[in-house]
Amino acid sequence: MTAVRPLGAVRARLAGSLPARRRGEFLALWAVAVATYGVGDLVTTLRIVTTQPMVVEGNPLVAAAVATYGVPGLVGLKLAGVAVCLLVSCYGALVWDDLFAYYAPPVGLALVGAVLTANNLWLLG
């Protein structure tokens, strides 16, 4: 288990942000995660929800959000999921100094997004 740093060390680390070599990596990881989960899955799910009434959303949380709030509900859930994962990733890098917490959220979102997008494309095909 990684010890939490004292508050002064956390502030100093946040002020300096990520090292230069990690900034590019961080942006690349999150660009892929947002492209697959945030855009790919969102666009294909929206297409299915709006054009394929015989296809039922498999995720009960997403189905409830779409039934209650429509497209804004789906977009809100996606944004909330990305925000939580981004927070964990930043906290892992800057506070916990934990590489798993840093890498797992964007890599996990990218993998989930790729699988869901592929599944949605198959359903649309």
Image: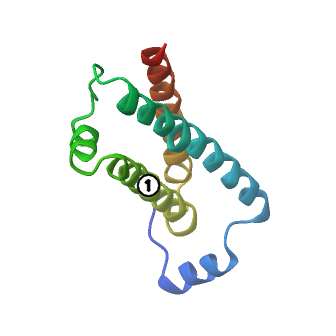
Q: 88 or 10, which lies in front?
A: 88
Q: 69 or 100, which lies in front?
A: 69
* Mark 1: amino acid: Leu
Location of residue 45 with respect to 17 vertically, above or below: above
Q: 54 or 9, which lies in front?
A: 54
Q: Residue at x 21, y 49 (%)?
A: 68
Q: Residue 81 location, x and y as percent?
A: 40, 51
**Side of 23 relative to 43 (left or right):** right
Location of residue 91 with respect to 120 vertically, above or below: below
Q: Residue at x 46, y 52 (%)?
A: 82
Q: Residue at x 35, y 51 (%)?
A: 77
**Mark 1 closeness class: few <14, some 14–19, many ≥20 residues within 10 Å:** some
Q: Residue at x 50, y 37 (%)?
A: 43
Q: Quadrant of the N terminus?
A: bottom left
Q: Residue 3 location, x and y as percent?
A: 44, 67
Q: Quarter-wise, where is residue 17 in the image?
A: bottom right
Extreme right residue here?
A: 20
SS at mark 1?
A: helix
**Side of 59 relative to 85 (left or right):** left
**Side of 56 relative to 34 (left or right):** left
Q: Residue 4 location, x and y as percent?
A: 44, 70
Judging by the rendered image, the residue that carries numbered circle 1 is 79
